[in-house]
Each structure stands twice: as C-alpha cells, then as structure tokens.
Image (tube, grey):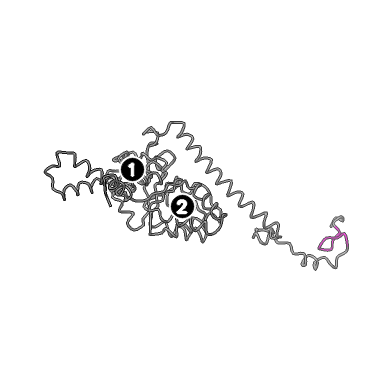
Amino acid sequence: MFNNPEHLEAFFTQKRLSTFFNEITLQEDNVEFADVSFSERIQKAVEEQVNFDSDALILRLQKVAKLRFPDAHLSDFSGDNSQNLSVEKINNIATLGWMKYGQNLGLTGKAGTGKTRLGCAIANEAILHGHSVLFYRYSELLRDMEIKEREGLEKLKLFLKKLCRVKVLVIDDWGLSPLTNNQRQLLFELIDLRAEKSSLILTSQYQKDVWYDVFKRDCTTDALMDRIYHCTTEIALEGVQREAAVGSRTVLDVLDAEQELLDAKVSLVGADRDQVVASFQLQEAIGQLTAKNLALPVKIYNPLNHYKEIRSKWFGSNSSGQNPGKQIK
C-alpha cells in the first residue's frame, strides 16, 4: 500500500496528521533521537500534532468570532483599580467557572470605559480554552433576526440554531435602542433557547437594575428578563476612559462615542413621544378619544340629560327658563 515515502506522506496528509508525519521524518535525520525509544518518539510526534491542531482550532475560532478587538487580552486589565477590576476579579473571570452552568456576564459603564474591549478580552480567554464565540452589535443582531424572519420561518429557525450552537455570544451595546414588539419577541426566542445552556457577555451603558425599564415592561419583557436577569453577574466599570488610555481610541473617538450615546437617548425620548402621540391618534380614529375614556377630571356632557332639561323651555331662554337678554331685578 505504501510503496514509497510519498504515498505514506499523502496518507497522513489525508488523515490531517501531516504534523505527526513531519515530526517522525525530522527525528530520522536528527542524531539527538538516536538513543530515544520508539514510544518516546511517537509520544513526541503526537504532542506536536496535538499542539498544531490546538493552534489551528484557536485560529479558526478567532476568525469565526469576529471580535471587535481581536487582540484584547485579560492581561491588559489585570489589577486596574481605576476600572474596579482587581487581580482577584480578573482571575475569577479567567477560570471561566461562570460558563459551566450557562451563567452570563453583564459589563456596564459609560461610553469609553472599555466595556467592549473587556468583553472581547473575556471572549478571547474562552477561545483559548477551545470554546466557540460570536460577537454581535445589539442593533445588528436585531436586524439580522428580522431579515431571517422575512425570508421565512425555516430561515429564522436555522439562524437561531446557529446562534445557540455558540458557547459564548457577545452582545455589544445591550439595550441601547428601543425595541419594537416584534424585536422584543425575537430577542426573547433567542434568549429562551440559550437559557442555562450557554453563556452571554452583555456590554451596556445601563446598569442592570434599570434593564426592565429600558426594555419597556410588558409580559414579553418580564419573560425575557426572567431568563437573563438573575443568572447575569454584573461588572460595573468605573473611572477613566479606558480605551483612550490604552491607545485604542483617540479623544475624538471618545467624544464621538459620547455623542452617539446622547443621540441614542434623544432617539429614545423621541420614540416614547411618538408612541404616546400614535396611541392618541388611534383612539381618535376609532372614536375613543373622549373625556370619559380618558378619565379626565371634568363634568361629562350628557346630551340626553340636557335634552330632558330644556325640552319644555321656550326658544331663546336658558335652562332655568329665564330670558338671557332680560335683566333680573
């Protein structure tokens, strides 16, 4: 079967064991292995193949993850007291113990505090341990889910299944923009499918305590938060603007980020106003925009009672039967 070394090399290459074959070949020409036993030489070749496969796996996982900061590492944050990140806290995160039972991490803080970079650093740590990771901007995740929904139910199911296969899903700028009812339902479907099976890393400019209010409380929001709130550990970043400090952002970038936050807050207020106006317009269209339905603190006009009150009165007199043009003495 293997008449020459080329056939043997082709066989190992086909089995994706080319590193093993190359190591064995190098050992034959290396005098240092002259006194090494056969089993030790095989063990060395196997170790080289395992290390190669591990490195290749990490490269593939990093490529698929599409992290915003692929070069971010937890060592960049170790012992950064200005960010409320002690060495102990970083070490606890690095153990990935929070992933064992599908727990989540919530990284909260103002624009420029380094939430996204820290999230990418934690994600990279998961990749180094062989876990699959995927990075998504909050708005882009909602957009892609709606696109798949318009393409058909099967397309949406396949997309959600793909997201559920990922061990760590990073959602950047969590809760930054208001949700439509459809987006809220789609997000619930995703979180429900992943709950307690795989982990989330959420970066948000809102503290965890106000997430209920950010998502506008209703039955779907309550169900969504029930799946995520109590199994999410919050890490609130403080202090100086980290990304500017490490050189990944310029002052202009930080100012742009703060302006983006302000614009988002203005948009949120505008959306709330539009929702209120639309509700009144709907009530007007269906004839429900009345003082009675709005429970206004005013006397409600009753045309039947008014008719009964004036039906026996002369034209030109008021409800008391007096001529309004005649002065009473």
Q: Residues within 10 Å of mark 1 (few under 14, many from 20)?
A: some
Residue situated furthest front in the rendering: 3
At a point 87% along the width and 55% down the height, the residue shown is: 325
**CB atoms at circles 1 and 2 under 8 Å apart?**
no
Distance from label 1 to label 2 (Cα)?
21 Å
39 over 220 or under it: above or below: above
Q: Is residue 321 magenta?
A: yes
Residue range of the region highlighted in magenta in the rendering: 315-323
Give the SS element for disc 1.
loop
- Looking at the image, the residue that sits furthest to the top is 251
Foreground of the two, 238 or 94: 94
Q: Position of residue 47 (x, y in %)?
A: 23, 47
Q: Quadrant of residue 116?
A: top left
| Residue 52 place in picture, x, y as percent | 29, 45
Q: Which residue is mark 2?
A: 211
Where residue 73 appears, as percent x and y from the top left, is 33, 41
- Residue at the spot 55% in from the left edge and 51% down from the top edge: 147
